């Protein structure tokens, strides 16, 4: 039986909520220190986990030696003086004590241990190397790191403290949807699960993971909706005698190809654009068209997937089957035009998310 909840990840920019430039700079510097410490801690944790797992290979024990990666109090052959998960936590906790919140270290340790266990067999066979982390890695935290979340009615912003640092959510163009999620979080209608903070070019982004109850609809599991993704129509769906074509080739490709043509014309004239601030100024118009194409495609795919799921809910179809999808993806990869302009994978992922949220079982044939 499936779970009754689903998760949604949103990338939200954060701003330091302090009055002076010096204070904001100091807060940002502290975040960079935490990120650097997480980078060091991650490499230490996976190195120790690997050594623990490969102890017999490294130390070349005799056949009479028996050991288990367990607490010596719980097993006769245990070689640890504490639980295994606590070995690596105490390692990084002792080293970075007082330099960063322990909440971050706790979730970093549990996340890496879970990932290590998933790849343990590949490590043992020599088919995979131990992970190596980058200095700009995102670091995890739980809802405890988001303290005192409140809505400022006067300035229409959400304020909170990221551990000890005052922050505000910068909602940008995705204003209404993110606002609703944050209001529901404040009201306790959804939960914030282990999320990540990422520093990119002196900007702060939270990859927030929201968990909420799935939508409850009167669906019949034995009622099947058969959907097909094609070049002529983005989606064709059939439920019994009911049939619906969602979008069309002309409607989807016409606008996208028009944006691409405009971009090519701008690209041809970049060398003649006014200079003065280097490459960024010359390619400003080019970036605008690039973003316009991406936004248009994402909007269309959201609309198509939403209409598909609404059609399934209307006819109470509890199972959705995407027909012959593997074969169509293979054909699209062989055709340069289709591979470039027909976003099969993105559309499939959006259908998958919306189907899970509505409680519809998705089968990809």
Image (spheres, rainbow, N blue to C red):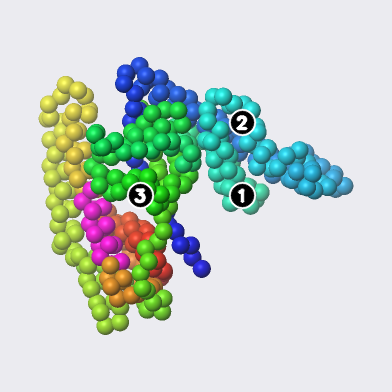
Residue 363 in the image, given as x and y percentages of width and height: 41, 69
Q: Looking at the image, is 245 positioned above or below residue 67?
A: below
The first of marks 3 and 1 along the sequence is: 1
Q: Which residue is mark 2?
A: 93
Q: Quadrant of the C terminus?
A: bottom left
Secondary structure, mark 1, is helix
| Pointer 3 with pointer 2, Cβ within 8 A | no
- Distance in Å between CA atoms under marks 3 and 1: 35 Å
Q: CA distance from mark 2 to mark 1?
A: 21 Å
Which dot marks residue 117? 1
In the image, is 210 to the left or to the right of 86? left
Q: Main secondary structure of the magenta part?
A: helix
Q: Secondary structure at mark 3?
A: helix
Secondary structure, mark 2, is helix
Q: Is residue 181 above or below residue 152?
A: below
Taking depth in this image into account, of 229 and 189 the one nearest to the observer is: 189
Name the residue tied to disc 3.
184
Q: Earlier in the sequence, mark 3 or mark 2?
A: 2
Binning the other alpha carbons within 10 Å of mark 3 as few (below 14), some (14 to 19) or many (20 upward) gives some
Q: Which residues are magenta?
A: 295-309
Residue 56 percent coordinates (x, y): 76, 43
């Amino acid at each position: 039986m499936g779970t009754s909840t689903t998760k949604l990840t949103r990338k939200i920019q954060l701003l330091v909520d302090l009055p002076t430039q010096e204070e904001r700079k100091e807060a940002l510097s502290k975040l960079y220190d935490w990120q650097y410490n997480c980078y060091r801690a991650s490499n230490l944790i996976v190195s120790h986990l690997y050594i623990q797992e490969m102890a017999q290979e490294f130390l070349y024990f005799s056949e009479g030696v028996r050991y288990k990666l367990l607490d010596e109090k719980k097993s006769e052959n245990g070689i640890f003086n504490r639980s295994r998960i606590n070995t690596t936590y105490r390692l990084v906790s002792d080293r970075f004590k007082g330099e960063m919140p322990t909440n971050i270290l706790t979730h970093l340790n549990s996340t890496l241990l879970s990932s290590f266990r998933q790849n343990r067999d590949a490590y043992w066979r020599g088919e995979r190397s131990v992970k190596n982390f980058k200095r700009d890695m995102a670091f995890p935290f739980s809802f405890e790191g988001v303290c005192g979340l409140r809505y400022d009615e006067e300035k229409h912003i959400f304020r909170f403290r990221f551990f000890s640092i005052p922050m505000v959510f910068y909602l940008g163009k995705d204003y209404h949807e993110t606002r609703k999620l944050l209001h529901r979080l404040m009201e306790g209608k959804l939960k914030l699960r282990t999320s990540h903070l990422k520093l990119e070019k002196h900007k702060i982004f939270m990859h927030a993971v929201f968990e909420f109850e799935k939508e409850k609809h009167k669906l019949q599991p034995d009622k099947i909706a058969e959907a097909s993704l094609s070049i002529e129509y983005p989606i064709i769906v059939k439920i019994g005698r009911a049939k619906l074509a969602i979008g069309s080739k002309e409607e989807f490709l016409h606008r996208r190809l028009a944006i691409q043509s405009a971009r090519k014309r701008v690209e041809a004239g970049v060398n003649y654009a006014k200079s003065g601030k280097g490459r960024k100024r010359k390619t400003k118009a080019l970036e605008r068209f690039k973003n316009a194409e991406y936004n248009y495609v994402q909007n269309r795919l959201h609309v198509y997937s939403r209409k598909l799921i609404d059609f399934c809910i209307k006819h109470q179809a509890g199972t959705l089957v995407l027909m012959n999808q593997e074969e169509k993806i293979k054909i699209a990869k062989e055709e340069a035009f289709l591979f470039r302009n027909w976003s099969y994978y993105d559309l499939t992922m959006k259908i998958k998310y919306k189907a899970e949220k509505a409680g519809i079982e998705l089968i990809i044939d």
